C-alpha cells in the first residue's frame, strides 16, 4: 500500500514546481510523482548532463513536461536565472522544493574550514538563496498562493555526531521554515518541511555509509518498523504538502522515519532487547523489593 501513489489524479494539475537537486535520488522520485499528478517540473542541479538524462527519462515515464536548468544553489545569480527560465517557459511558478544538499561523514576536527563551509553553503545558503529569490517574486507579483517545501532531517533538532555541518545547516533550514511560515503567510506563501529518516539513495549512501559500513550498520535495525523508507511514500507526503489539500498546514515539519529518531532518544528503549520470557522474572524481582 505505502509503495502506491496516494493522491487522486490531477491533484497538482498545471502547477509549476521547481525541485533543486531534482535529477537524482529523492528529488527525482518526488519530481516523478509531481509530474504524474499533472504538474510541470523544473529540475536543477550542478550537472546538466545528468539533468538532461533525467528530463528525458521523466518525460517518457510520465508524459509530463520537464525543464532542466543548470544551477549551483550557492550562487544567487544562478538561482535568479532558474526563476527567470521557469517564468519564460511556463509563465508562472507555484512551488519550490528545497531538496539539494551536500553531506559526508567525518570527525569534525578533520574538517577544513572550507569543508564545513561547503556543506553549510549548499544546504543552508542554497535553501536561503532559492527561498529569497522565489519569495521576493511571489510577493512582488502578489501571487495569491505559493508553497515552499524544505527537506531537512531528524537531526535538525537532535543534532548528530559526524555530520555536524549538515546538522548545523539543516537546523537553520528548519528555523527558516518556521519563521517564514508566520512572516510570509500574509503573502499567501506556505512554508513546511519534511524530515526523512533513512531512504536509500546512491548520493547519500556513498557518502554516509561508504564501503562496508553499509553492512556493518544496517539502517533497518535502527527503525522500529523494521525497514528503510520507500521513495514513493516520501513522494506521497511531498505531493500532499505541495498540493492545496494541505492548505491549512503551515510551519510544520513532518517526520517520516518509521520511529527511528525516537528509538534513539527514549531512555529505556534498549529494553526492546529483553526477550518476552524474561519479563515474568523481572517483574518478580521488582515486586520483591516492596517493603
Ligand atoms: C573531509 C572533505 C570530504 C571528506 C570533501 N571535503 N569531501 N573533507 N572529508 N569526505 C572537503 C574538500 O577537501 C574541500 O575542502 C571541501 O570539502 C569542498 O570539497 P569539494 O569536493 O571541492 O566540494 P564540491 O565539489 O562543492 O562538493 C560538495 C560535497 C560533495 C558536499 C563535498 O560530497 C557533493 O557534491 N555532494 C552532493 C550530494 C550529496 O552530498 N548528497 C548526500 C545528501 S545526503 P578543502 O579545504 O580541501 O578545500 C543527506 C542525508 C542526511 O544530506 C540524512 C541521512 C539519514
Ligand atoms: P542526492 O541524490 O545526493 O541528492 C542531492 C542533490 O543535490 C543531487 O541531485 C545534487 O545534484 C544536488 N546538489 C548538490 N549540491 C548542489 C548545489 N551546490 N547546487 C545545486 N544542486 C546541488 O541525495 P538524496 O538522498 O536524494 O538527498 C535529497 C535530500 O534528502 C537532501 O536534502 C538530503 O539531505 C535529504 N535527506 C535524505 C535522506 C536519505 O536517507 N536519503 C535522509 C534525510 C534527508 P548535483 O550533484 O548534480 O549538483
Image (cartoon, helix red, strand yellow):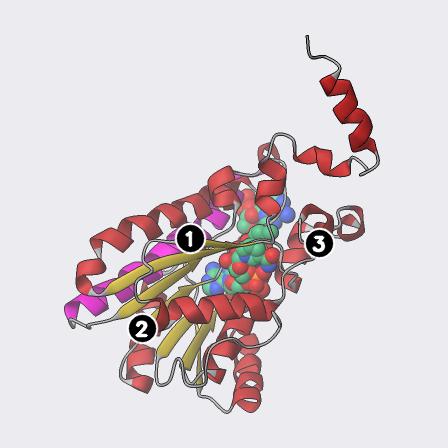
Q: Is residue 116 magenta?
A: yes
Query: What secondary structure is marked by label 1?
Result: strand
Q: Is residue 172 above or below residue 4?
A: above
Front position among marks 1 and 2: 1
Q: Residue furthest front?
A: 291
Nearer to us in this view, 88 or 32: 32
| Residue 112 percent location from the top left of the image | 55, 39
Q: From which residue to which does the magenta span run?
A: 111-140
Q: Residue furthest right?
A: 277
Give me the residue at 72% from left, 19% from top: 287
Ligand 2 neighbours mark 3 (CB distance < 8 Å): no
Front position among marks 1 and 3: 3
| Residue 86 percent location from the top left of the image | 33, 79
Q: Is residue 23 above or below residue 162?
A: below
- Where is mark 1, residue-wise? 253
Which label number is shown at residue 83?
2
| Label 2 close to label 3 by CB (< 8 Å) | no
Which corner quadrant of the image does residue 148 belong to? bottom left
- Where is mark 3, residue-wise? 226
The kind of secondary structure the magenta stretch mainly shows is helix
Amino acid at each position: 500500500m505505502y509503495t502506491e501513489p496516494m493522491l487522486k489524479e490531477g491533484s497538482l494539475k498545471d502547477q509549476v514546481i521547481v525541485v533543486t537537486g531534482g535529477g537524482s535520488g529523492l528529488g527525482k522520485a518526488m519530481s516523478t510523482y509531481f509530474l504524474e499528478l499533472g504538474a510541470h517540473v523544473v529540475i536543477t542541479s550542478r550537472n546538466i548532463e545528468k539533468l538532461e538524462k533525467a528530463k528525458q527519462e521523466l518525460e517518457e515515464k510520465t508524459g509530463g513536461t520537464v525543464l532542466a536548468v543548470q544551477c549551483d544553489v550557492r550562487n544567487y545569480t544562478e538561482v535568479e536565472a532558474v526563476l527567470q527560465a521557469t517564468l519564460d517557459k511556463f509563465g508562472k511558478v507555484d512551488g519550490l522544493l528545497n531538496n539539494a544538499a551536500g553531506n559526508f561523514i567525518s570527525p569534525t576536527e578533520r574538517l577544513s574550514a572550507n569543508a564545513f563551509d561547503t556543506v553549510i553553503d549548499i544546504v543552508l545558503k542554497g535553501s536561503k538563496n532559492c527561498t529569497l529569490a522565489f519569495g521576493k517574486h511571489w510577493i512582488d507579483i502578489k501571487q495569491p498562493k505559493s508553497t515552499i517545501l524544505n527537506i531537512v532531517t531528524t537531526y535538525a533538532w537532535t543534532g548528530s555526531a559526524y555530520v555536524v555541518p549538515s546538522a548545523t545547516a539543516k537546523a537553520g533550514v528548519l528555523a527558516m521554515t518556521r519563521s517564514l511560515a508566520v512572516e510570509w503567510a500574509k503573502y499567501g506563501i506556505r512554508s513546511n518541511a519534511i524530515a526523512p529518516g533513512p531512504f536509500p539513495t546512491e548520493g547519500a549512501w556513498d557518502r554516509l555509509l561508504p564501503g562496508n559500513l553499509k553492512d556493518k550498520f544496517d539502517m533497518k535495525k535502527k527503525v522500529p518498523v523494521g525497514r528503510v523508507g520507500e521513495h514513493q511514500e516520501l513522494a506521497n507526503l511531498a505531493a500532499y504538502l505541495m498540493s492545496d489539500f494541505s492548505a491549512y498546514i503551515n510551519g510544520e515539519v513532518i517526520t517520516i522515519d518509521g520511529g527511528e529518531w525516537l528509538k534513539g532518544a527514549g531512555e529505556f528503549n534498549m529494553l526492546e532487547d529483553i526477550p518476552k520470557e524474561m519479563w515474568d522474572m523481572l517483574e518478580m524481582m521488582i515486586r520483591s523489593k516492596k517493603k
